[in-house]
Image (spheres, rainbow, N blue to C red):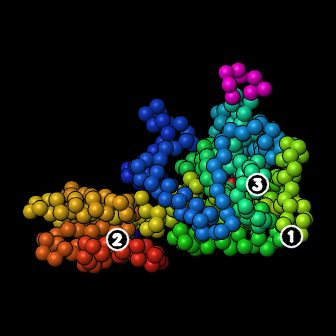
Amino acid sequence: MGNNLTMDMLVSLCKRRGFVYQSSDIYGGLSSAWDYGPLGVELKKNIQEFWWKEMTRLHDNIVGIDAAIMMHPRVWEASGHVENFTDPLVDCKKCKQRFREDKLPDENRKSKKCPDCGGELTDSRQFNLMFKTFMGPVEDGGNLVYLRPETAQGIYVNFRNVVQTSRVKVPFGIAQVGKAFRNEITTKNFIFRTCEFEQMEMQYFIAPEEDDKWFEYWKKERWEYYNKLGIRQSKLRFHQHGPGELAHYAKDAYDIEYEFPMGWQELEGIHNRTNYDLSRHTEFSGKDLAYLEEGTNKRFIPFVIETSAGLTRTVLTVLSDAYEEQDVAEGDTRVVMHFHPIIAPVKLGVFPLVKKDGLAELAQKVELDLRGDFATFYDHGGAIGRRYRRQDEIGTPYCVTIDYQTKEDNTVTLRYRDSMEQVRIKIDAIPEFIRKADKEYRREK
Ligand code: GAP
């Protein structure tokens, strides 16, 4: 069967199986806002945990923080976001739709005609992407706060706190996962670009003269990370930012791009932010953010290599990459999600072959005993083949079936999602078997 994945196919699966729903659905929906359902929230949490482990616990010099979303408004003046974090927008005078001028097709940009209705477009204006709100009961300028458009600034303003309290020494990193908000003009690409999203960012503080070395190091690490996450390498590529693309803080930047159903798009940015942010916060706060190097007594403002991945965008990547429609037998097809087992929302399905003769009770006991170790799902509804298909469609990597032989010798059949092969193993051996299979997992090409 063809595998020309479209965004509509993904949206439909996500809704049908409870990965992602349109926000405020019963009110007609809020465009570009999405809610994560029972399976989506597990998938997102598993990706976040995997990133956290890879970026903090597996390094001896990277620590985490969790900063507040709302920060002092001066932070955003210092960071340059008040001045520079803008998109050029145009409005259609006829249908009133708003577009990003730099994303319009060439012909529409030149002719100043609306791509939807052909109406006349206004001149472009710079529009700041930060959401504003007011802290406290009075809505005046003195109470203005922004919802953070990146998590990175929460790390920079805590640089001094972390250096003083956690014995880290340059080079070291601070990692954070959290919500970010941008008042974007979103296109119809599901959770790819939303106004509210989550980022997984790590800022690596280094001696200025070592920036090239660490930039290359993190480019390699982050590429390898997607390999470990099970993303097909043929669907990934690097894109270096040209001078016109570089953010206001960056000296050099590479995107890791993924080939989504709508084409190649950014998944993660790796940036050499120099000492721009710490210098600006030194200037605007009046606090000295220089680092004193032990031994040499050299004082300097560290450079920063940033790795910035979208968590919600990684969910879309993982969903797109996992989806396959397969012909499995004459006239029989299945949808299978090839999630890497370490992030699958359900790790193990447990079924009795039939409900009678005590098999259901036995299967329930097996499932209960495994709950502490794995995300399990018990199912006795319908033919066994249908139960397997339902788990394939949500990417459950292993299913065990309890049958009459189980009563005799305490063995079960364990079925692999990708190959559909079955092996017979002892009930006691299930946890170890799964841990080993997880480690050895390789997606078939
Ligand atoms: N701190 C640097 C920074 O924020 P960015 O390239 O603007 O850099 C980093 O964003 C990542 O955050 C992107 O690669 C993308 O994965 C994610 N991201 C950015 N804007 C997003 C949006 N509107 N919706 C979903 N994810 C977004």
Which of discs 2 and 3 lies nearer the camera? The answer is: 3
* Three-letter amino acid code of the residue under disc 3: Gln
In the rendered image, the residue lying farthest to the top is 138
- Name the magenta segment's main secondary structure: loop
Dot 3 falls on a residue whose secondary structure is: helix
Instruction: Say few, some or many: other residues with alpha carbon within 10 Å of mark 2 (under 14 / 14 to 19 / 20 or more).
Output: few
Query: Distance of mark 2 from mark 1, alpha carbons?
Result: 49 Å
Identify the residue under disc 1: 295
Identify the residue under disc 2: 431
Query: Distance of mark 1 from mark 3, alpha carbons?
Result: 17 Å
In front of the other: 60 or 120: 60
The reply to whether discs 2 and 1 touch (Cβ–Cβ < 8 Å) is no
Dot 2 falls on a residue whose secondary structure is: helix
Q: Residue visible at 72% across and 54% down? A: 165
Q: Earlier in the sequence, mark 1 or mark 3?
A: 3
Dot 1 falls on a residue whose secondary structure is: loop
Q: Which mark is residue 203?
A: none
* Three-letter amino acid code of the residue under disc 2: Pro
Q: Is residue 241 visible?
A: no
* Three-letter amino acid code of the residue under disc 1: Gly
Q: In the image, is residue 206 above or below residue 75?
A: below
Q: In the image, is residue 273 above or below residue 71?
A: below
- Left or right for 25, reference 215: left
Please identify the quarter of the rendering in which residue 271 is found: bottom right
Q: Position of residue 436 (x, y in %)?
A: 41, 77
In front of the other: 240 or 283: 283
Q: Position of residue 427 (x, y in %)?
A: 25, 72
Q: Which residues are magenta?
A: 135-143
